[in-house]
Image (cartoon, helix red, strand yellow):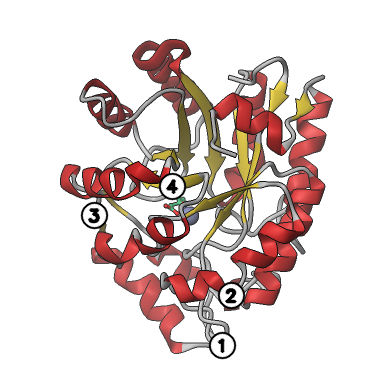
Amino acid sequence: MAVDGKVIITCAVTGAIHTPTMSPHLPITPDQITHEAIAAAEAGAAILHLHARNPETGQPDQTPEAFAKFLPRIKQGTNAAINITTGGSPYMRVEERVLPAAQFKPEVASLNMGSMNFGLYHLLDKYKEFKFDWEKTHLEATRDLVFRNSFKDIQYILETCYDNDTRFEFECYDISHLYNLNHFAERGLVKPPFFVQSVFGLLGGIGSHPEDVAHMKRTADRLFGDQYRWSVLGAGAAQLRVAAQAAALGGNIRVGLEDSLWAGKGKLATSNADQVKLARKLIEGLGMQVATPDEARAILSLKG
Ligand SMILES: C[C@H](N)CC(=O)CC(=O)O
Ligand SMILES: [Zn+2]
């Protein structure tokens, strides 16, 4: 819940879902990722969720070397908390996916709380021509893709990062994922407050209807009571609508070009900061305030 009316904005700067042909504004190179991350923080993002890409082709790159090309500069340029993905790309194995978080010991790392179909092939209806061959394959192959996050995979990431005092952004794409988180809580493998990032509107997970958002919150309230901090992300066109509903319900918000390329209906976002500014307007419009990085650290008990 927004603590003392402070709402945490997370910005997911580039991700591993969208591809270069989809938007000229998708940051690919280390310079672009660095610039976009710092600008998003200046606009109000307290947490920066980071993936790396091949600077030439934009292909997801989960090697620590790729992250090392922008992490130090981002840390120098902003006080925002760093959140390194352990999801990588849904095609990767968990041993590869956990490497950057294990090496850089960030304040936050994402943790996907269940296996699921991860559909992107429907985007092929929209984009006919692609700059790079891998883009079409990347989308097409999701027709038969299972994003694997077995209990063993999840425990492997938890144990690999345990001594780093890294806390997790628990990505819950469906109600069952909340129960999986509860399972690890009961086993004492995760400690509160749980930063629950509910994902809405990704093909293979829960939808983005207001009933879905309400159902996810009701279930999390019942399972975790005051032991969790709720945040939401809406995929694609649902981003701002889901953010508005959640903020009104006391939730925190995730935006960024990883989750949506848009800044309103049919309008391509020209930067991550664009979306952060829209989120800020929402929050302040509701009479709440945007949490600073240090306020977010206090709310989420981050190591700082
Ligand atoms: C829907 C988002 N792409 C979820 C995500 O951010 C996964 C991760 O990086 O671990
Ligand atoms: Zn991610």
Which sits earlier in the primary sequence, circle 3 or circle 1?
1
Residue 270 percent across, percent down from the top left: 77, 64
Q: Secondary structure at mark 3?
A: loop
Q: Is mark 4 within 8 Å of ligand 1?
A: yes
Work out how far the residue at label 1 is from the one at label 4, CA to CA, in angstroms.
26 Å
Residue 102 percent across, percent down from the top left: 38, 57
Work out how far the residue at label 2 is from the one at label 1, CA to CA, in angstroms.
14 Å
Which sits earlier in the primary sequence, circle 2 or circle 1?
1
The residue drawn where x is 44% and y is 88% is 133
The residue drawn where x is 60% and y is 25% is 299
Instruction: Pick whichever, 155 or 213, lies toward us.
Output: 155
| Mark sitting on residue 69 | 2
Q: Amino acid at mark 2?
A: Lys
Work out how far the residue at label 4 is from the one at label 2, CA to CA, in angstroms.
20 Å
Which sits earlier in the primary sequence, circle 4 or circle 2?
2
Tag 3: Cα neighbours inside 10 Å, few (<14), some, or many (≥20)?
Answer: many
Q: Secondary structure at mark 2?
A: loop
Q: Amino acid at mark 3?
A: Arg
Work out how far the residue at label 3 is from the one at label 1, CA to CA, in angstroms.
28 Å
> Which residue, given by chain and number where applicable, does mark 3 sit on?
148
**Dot 1 and dot 4 residues touching (CB under 8 Å):** no
| Mark sitting on residue 110 | 4
Q: Quadrant of the C terminus?
A: top right
Which sits earlier in the primary sequence, circle 3 or circle 4?
4
| Mark sitting on residue 239 | none
**Dot 2 and dot 1 residues touching (CB under 8 Å):** no
Q: Amino acid at mark 1?
A: Glu
